[in-house]
Amino acid sequence: MATQQQPLPPEPGDSYVQSFARGLQVIRSFSASAPRQTLSQVAAASGLTRAGARRILLTLQTLGYVASDGKLFALTPRILDLGFAYLSSMPIWNRAEPVMEGLVQQVQESCSAAVLDATDIVYVMRVPTHKIMRISLGVGSRLPAYCTSMGRLLLADLDEQELRARLEASTLEAFTKHTVTDIDALLAKVAQARRQGWCLVNQELEEGLVSIAAPIVDRAGRTVAALNISGQANRTSAKVMQDSMLPALLAAAREISRLL
């Protein structure tokens, strides 16, 4: 299965294709806050010269991944093919979706699945109920691993050296007054998640947001993804979530693991 946790990116070596890397930099320069950009904006955002950015944009336009009105450039829907190639290589999520939908119906809270990529988690499936976050989440969305329930559970599968390396490589930002940013304290939180086999994070990513996660494991017992449910603290407290929803979450995670 292709959801194995990826190590930190290696340093560029002799096999590094710089032009390809620059093309990815240009693609990543587009975002929800910058969906349409001029050539100068793309060059600045991707750290390239105008000439270099122009060559890459015209190549992407020829391939159908970028469109332009002569002044502004924007990604086209074809760019979704790149992400879909990853998801289509993991048919497990098609089979997991009904399990997640059943869990949402049971607990009446949103359910998500994510994998670990360097210092972030990446959403691979989401079944929402109410909109509970200011952040708009969907497949492909990224969040920092250190302050999310799924992230800490995925980090718990790493050995101690790799775990510390990823935490040290993370930008440990205090999103709320509850966010844990001290590395030793985070190591203790991850160790707790490892011992108990689940993880609850209470308002560390966003005020009022509570989430609890369970591991999805392969036949060898390695955590390859995480499943969570999340809700509003003023509607579902951390204690209520742990007492009344954790058993259903663990059962759903075991069922998805069985499908592997």
Image: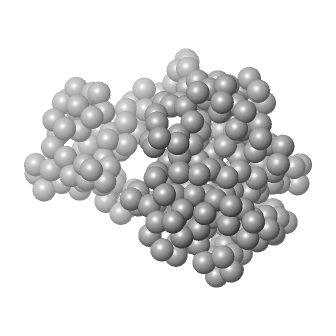
Task: Report the residue that reaches farthest toward the right.
Answer: 220
Residue at image position (48%, 30%) is 171
Image quadrant in which the C terminus is located: bottom right
Instruction: Name which quarter of the figure residue 161 lies in.
Output: top right
Instruction: Name which quarter of the figure residue 192 lies in.
Output: top right
- Residue 67 in percent (x, y) is at 23, 56
Residue at image position (44%, 70%) is 131
- Residue 199 in percent (x, y) is at 71, 50
Display colour scheme: one colour
Residue at image position (10%, 51%) is 70
- Asked whether, in this view, residue 13 is left or right of residue 161, the answer is left
Question: Which residue is at the front of the view, 34 or 227?
Answer: 227
- Asked whether, in this view, residue 61 is left or right of residue 105, the answer is left
Residue 225 seen anywhere in this rendered image of the structure:
no
Task: Report the residue that reaches farthest toward the left.
Answer: 71
Residue 209 seen anywhere in this rendered image of the structure:
yes
Image quadrant in which the N terminus is located: bottom right
- Asked whether, in this view, residue 253 is left or right of residue 238, the answer is right
Residue at image position (57%, 58%) is 210
In the image, residue 76 sits, relative to residue 119, either above or below, namely: below
In the image, residue 160 sits, relative to residue 126, either above or below, namely: above
Question: Which residue is at the front of the view, 37 or 176?
Answer: 176
The number of numbered badges drawn on the structure is 0
